Image (cartoon, rainbow, N blue to C red):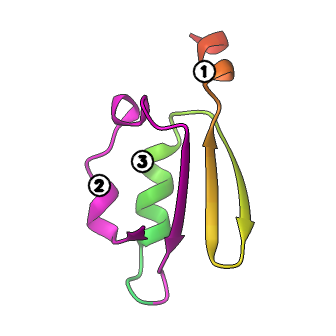
Amino acid sequence: MDIEKAVFQNINSSSLESIELLIIELHDFIIAGCAHSFYSNICSAPFEQSQKGGNLYILFNKRAESQIA
């Protein structure tokens, strides 16, 4: 999915509860602030990240989240 800056402005941790894996490609070179907007809105949930090419793979760690709560 192509991420535009506005897409993640209203996302909160409850919006992420049903997501286990998110594969995205951020386009800061087209619209400045995409990455900042994305990470600012997912940072409340534990996750692991890897990258292949331009794709970011975000794996939300549900086990770590339940141990914190």
Q: CA distance from mark 1 to mark 3?
A: 16 Å
The residue indicated by pointer 3 is 41
The stretch drawn in magenta includes residue 2: yes
- Residue at the extreme bottom: 30
The residue indicated by pointer 1 is 65
The percent coordinates of residue 48 (x first, y second) are 70, 44
Region in magenta? 1-29
The percent coordinates of residue 5 (x first, y second) are 33, 69
**Cβ atoms at labels 3 and 2 below 8 Å apart:** yes
Tell us which disc is closer to us: 1 or 2.
1
Q: Residues within 10 Å of mark 2 (few under 14, many from 20)?
A: few
Q: Earlier in the sequence, mark 3 or mark 2?
A: 2
The residue indicated by pointer 2 is 9
Q: Residue at x 49, y 89 (%)?
A: 29
Count of labels in the image: 3
Give, as a three-letter code, the residue at label 3.
Asn
